[in-house]
Amino acid sequence: MDGGQLHRLGRRLIDLSAAVTGEAGDLELTPGEAAVLEDVIKHPDGSVTEVHQRTGFAQSHVSASVARLKERGLIETVSDPLDGRRTRLRVTDEALKAITRRASRRVDEVIGRTVTEPAEAGRVIALLDELAALLL
């Protein structure tokens, strides 16, 4: 496998992941909102400045994304107890529950639609499990 194949495989896996985790009625996020939300999940109680530094997005973009995510009930803000001027960010419990529900959806159906031969679909799922065990 070369770098180009790896890149195409990665993009294909991302598309399959989106098909598994996205259902009608699920909350849709812009790529920027998704990146900010992911950063806040990985770094609870961070500040907008810290999210800006880690993501590389303009601080105004991070602030706007945080405002939209807060409005939708996905992020909550709290005053920093050491510096009342600074705001800390964390994901709401409701958002974490929704993310956990989406992440726990099985890939079998999507893989079965993609690889229509049942034996091959089973092999793809087994190979993905093996790959995850080796790389994650």
Image: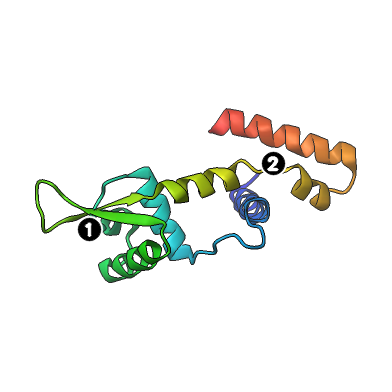
Left or right: 31 in relation to 80: right
Expressed as whole percent of the image width and height from the top left, the position of residue 71 reads 38, 66
Residue position for label 2: 106
Give residue 35's mark.
none
Between marks 2 and 1, how big is the CA–CA gap? Answer: 36 Å
Expressed as whole percent of the image width and height from the top left, the position of residue 6 reads 62, 48
Disc 1 residue type (three-letter):
Thr
Judged from the image, the secondary structure of the residue bearing numbered disc 2 is loop
Judged from the image, the secondary structure of the residue bearing numbered disc 1 is helix
Which is more toward the observer, 107 or 4?
107
How many residues crowd mark 2 within 10 Å: few (<14), some (14–19), many (20+)?
few
The residue drawn where x is 31% and y is 53% is: 54
Expressed as whole percent of the image width and height from the top left, the position of residue 15 reads 65, 56
Asked whether the beta carbons under mark 2 and mark 1 sit within 8 Å of each other, the answer is no
Give residue 49's mark.
1
Left or right: 81 in relation to 65: left
Disc 2 residue type (three-letter):
Arg
Locate the N terminus and report the quarter of the image it occupies. top right
**Vertically, is 126 above or below 20?**
above
The total number of labels drawn is 2
